[in-house]
């Protein structure tokens, strides 16, 4: 009689099970088995347990739980078609290069796994042929690089740019030949048969396990809402790892956007295609109308202030007297191009894709600049050379309910940080999860009580709003870093604070001081790990995904509690919605978000059971404000000290 799923899971994760026997250095962890069993029970419930509803589970699994195997094993043993979605490429790579080869060797030799990335990671054969025919191709790449891509195309089976290790991240060559959604001609493409995306779709249909990232998943889900097919086939269950990022990613894809760059990109493609495919008046008409649109969109972008960042579009419109006139000029110009492309489409089907791009662009522009849907927030983002207009949903819960939860057999969420103040309430409210969704909280197996110390400055230290705070914090950082003998990651809540500290610490410290921005993230982390007594200053992306095991990272300093400045239009709209619904935006929204970010930052210290070190948060509000207790309750159980002497003693005890 074959084993049930729960029996098979127990057999694999037991202290004398397959993992203990076959995986070098494996330690049986009760929390890992608990998580695997809970996921197995969600994927394959008892008959009376489901009552026709989707299986939902949220698991907070502390660092060191071994959550990746805890969800991969039951997912694969279930026999269902499962999507595993992560936020970072690092985790995707880990799954594909570490866990999957082991599982295939020892547990499921016939397992069919496929990693699917966003379209922009794959070469478009049609655009490649256009590029080769373009007289302007030398503007994007020299002949040597073009030949290298040509040679690669003779041997690649995937068309995945990651195979081109020599190609720079922002290479103009790749931008000219990539397979982005907006540029795809679909079934009208003359190269539809050998297309890498088409081949990928076929492979995806045959795979049991699909590994994707959140951006691809929600891009696909957003297209499904309108009945369009994308890369992902139908799946039964989805497992979200790094699930604390879901609201931000889903917001982007459930909204609408129109960018200056999109127009410039279309015009560039049209000029290339017209030179190659059209003659006479048809060619002239497309090129002239496209260039007129390029000029018009440049003029439109110039209407917006030069200050970079994200701002309210409606406030801008209210202050701009000629808005309707300017908006109509650009809309008319896009419409004019669409009509020209309809004529060109009579000469060849490949032009239908170009016409579709122009129509979708006009539709997005009209939706954002004319509509006034109270469920959306309208904003613009100014970057150095481009302006983007967007309409984003204030609340994504309804879309998730309609297009994900009700359409999927099982949905499982996991992360090291899902709870705030020891509850899932904030996470549930933001993603619209039913109140009866099952939850599980698994503490980290790392011994924070004996192997770490939490330092917070004592009474009299200035609060972050004080003028004295920057200088006092820089002095304190210097003393903490000296006590740790370098070996410190310093996380800042703003670029200006990081730069100010860098200037001082570079002069005062006898250690190498690395700073975010002076080299790619991977190279900085490699140098930080290699030079044991170095110091790394960073913001934003370094608060998570940094996995430096061992002595090189023995101290994490955080400048202050990571409250967001509520100037972002989407954040402001969400806070306003909570207020209008009778809630308290500070306690219901800002504090939970800050707690989750702080927990991610703090999580950089302990990456293995043998690590030890000091966490330092230079913000006395943890003790001077009532809400400080909420942050402290959400942190690991490290002993707390308010003076530097115990920190020095802690480091002097090292053997």
Image (cartoon, rainbow, N blue to C red):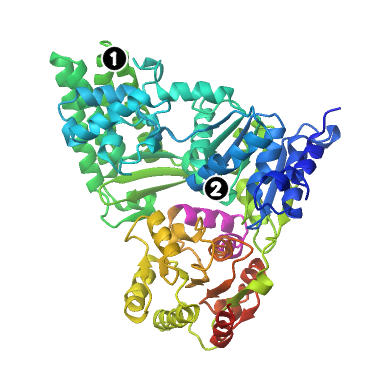
The secondary structure type at the circle numbered 1 is: loop
Q: Is residue 578 magenta?
A: yes
Quadrant hosting residue 351: top left
Q: Residue furthest top?
A: 347
Q: Quadrant of the C terminus?
A: bottom right
Q: Residues within 10 Å of mark 1 (few under 14, many from 20)?
A: some
Identify residue for label 1.
345
Q: Position of residue 464 (x, y in %)?
A: 46, 77
163 over 490 or under it: above or below = above
Q: Position of residue 340 (x, y in %)?
A: 24, 20
The secondary structure that most of the magenta stretch takes on is: helix
Quadrant hosting residue 549: bottom right
Q: Position of residue 55 (x, y in %)?
A: 73, 38
Q: Residues within 10 Å of mark 2 (few under 14, many from 20)?
A: some
Residue range (magenta): 570-593
Res 596 visible: yes
Q: Position of residue 173 (x, y in %)?
A: 26, 35
Front residue (pair 68, 398): 68
Estimate the spatial distance between the alpha carbons at disc 2 and disc 1, rounded to whole Å.
Answer: 40 Å
Residue that appears at 45% across and 81% down: 482
Identify residue for label 2.
247
Marks 2/1 in contact by CB < 8 Å: the verdict is: no
Front residue (pair 197, 375): 197
Front residue (pair 363, 637): 637
651 over 94 or under it: above or below = below
Residue that appears at 29% across and 57% down: 307
304 over 278 or under it: above or below = below
């Amino acid at each position: 009689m074959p084993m049930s799923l729960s029996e098979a899971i127990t057999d694999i994760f037991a202290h004398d099970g397959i993992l203990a026997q076959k995986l070098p250095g494996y330690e049986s962890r009760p929390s890992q088995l608990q998580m695997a069993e809970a996921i197995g029970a969600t994927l394959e419930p008892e008959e009376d347990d489901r009552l026709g509803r989707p299986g939902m589970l949220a698991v907070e699994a502390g660092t060191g739980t071994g959550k990746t195997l805890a969800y991969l094993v039951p997912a694969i043993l279930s026999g269902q078609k499962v999507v595993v979605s992560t936020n970072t490429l690092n985790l995707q790579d880990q799954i594909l290069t570490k866990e999957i080869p082991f599982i295939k060797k020892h547990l499921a030799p016939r397992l069919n796994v496929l990693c699917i990335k966003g379209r922009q990671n794959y070469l478009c054969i049609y655009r490649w042929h256009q590029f080769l025919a373009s007289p302007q191709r030398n503007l994007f790449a020299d002949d040597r690089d073009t030949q290298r891509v040509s040679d690669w195309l003779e041997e690649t089976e995937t068309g995945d740019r990651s195979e081109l290790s020599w190609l720079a991240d922002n290479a103009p060559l790749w931008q000219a030949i990539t397979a982005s959604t907006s540029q795809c001609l679909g079934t009208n493409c003359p190269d539809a048969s050998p297309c890498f995306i088409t081949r990928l779709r076929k492979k995806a249909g045959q795979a049991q396990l699909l590994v994707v990232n959140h951006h691809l998943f929600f891009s696909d889900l957003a297209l499904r809402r309108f009945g369009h097919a994308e890369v992902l086939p139908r799946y039964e269950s989805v497992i979200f790892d790094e699930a604390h990022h879901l609201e931000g990613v889903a917001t982007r894809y459930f909204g609408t956007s129109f960018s200056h760059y999109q127009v410039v990109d279309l015009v560039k493609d049209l000029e290339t295609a017209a030179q190659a495919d059209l003659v006479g008046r048809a060619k002239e008409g497309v090129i002239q109308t496209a260039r007129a649109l390029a000029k018009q969109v440049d003029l439109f972008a110039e209407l917006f202030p030069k200050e970079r960042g994200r701002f309210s579009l409606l406030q801008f419109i209210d202050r701009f007297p000629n808005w309707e006139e300017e908006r109509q000029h650009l809309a008319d110009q896009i419409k004019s191009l669409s009509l020209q492309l309809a004529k060109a489409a009579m000469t060849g089907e490949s032009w239908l894709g170009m016409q579709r791009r122009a129509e979708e662009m006009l539709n997005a522009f009209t939706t954002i600049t004319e509509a006034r849907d109270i469920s959306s927030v309208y904003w613009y983002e100014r970057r150095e050379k481009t302006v983007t207009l967007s309409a984003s949903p204030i609340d994504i819960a309804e879309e998730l309910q309609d297009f994900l939860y009700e359409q999927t057999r099982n949905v499982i969420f996991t992360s090291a940080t899902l709870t705030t103040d020891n509850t899932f309430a904030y996470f549930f409210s933001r993603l619209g999860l039913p109140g009866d969704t099952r939850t599980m909280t698994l503490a980290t197996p790392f011994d924070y009580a004996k192997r770490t110390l939490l330092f917070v400055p004592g009474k009299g230290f200035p609060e972050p709003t004080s003028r004295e705070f920057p200088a006092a914090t820089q002095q304190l950082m210097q003393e903490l870093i000296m006590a740790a003998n370098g070996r410190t990651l310093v996380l800042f809540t703003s670029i200006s604070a990081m730069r100010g500290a860098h200037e001082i610490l570079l002069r005062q410290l006898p250690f190498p001081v690395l700073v975010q921005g002076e080299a790619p993230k991977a190279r900085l982390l490699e140098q930080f790990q290699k030079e044991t007594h170095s110091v790394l200053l960073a913001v934003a992306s370094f608060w998570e995904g940094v996995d430096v095991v061992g002595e090189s990272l023995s101290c994490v300093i955080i400048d202050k509690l990571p409250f967001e400045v509520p100037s972002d239009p989407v954040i402001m709209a969400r806070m306003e919605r909570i207020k209008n619904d009778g809630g308290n935006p500070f306690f219901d929204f800002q504090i939970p978000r800050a707690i989750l970010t702080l927990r991610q930052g703090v999580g950089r210290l302990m990456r293995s059971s043998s690590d030890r070190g000091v966490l330092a948060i230079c913000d006395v509000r943890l003790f001077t404000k009532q809400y400080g207790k909420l942050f402290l309750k959400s942190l690991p159980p490290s002993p707390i000290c308010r003076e530097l002497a115990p920190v020095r003693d802690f480091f002097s005890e090292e053997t």
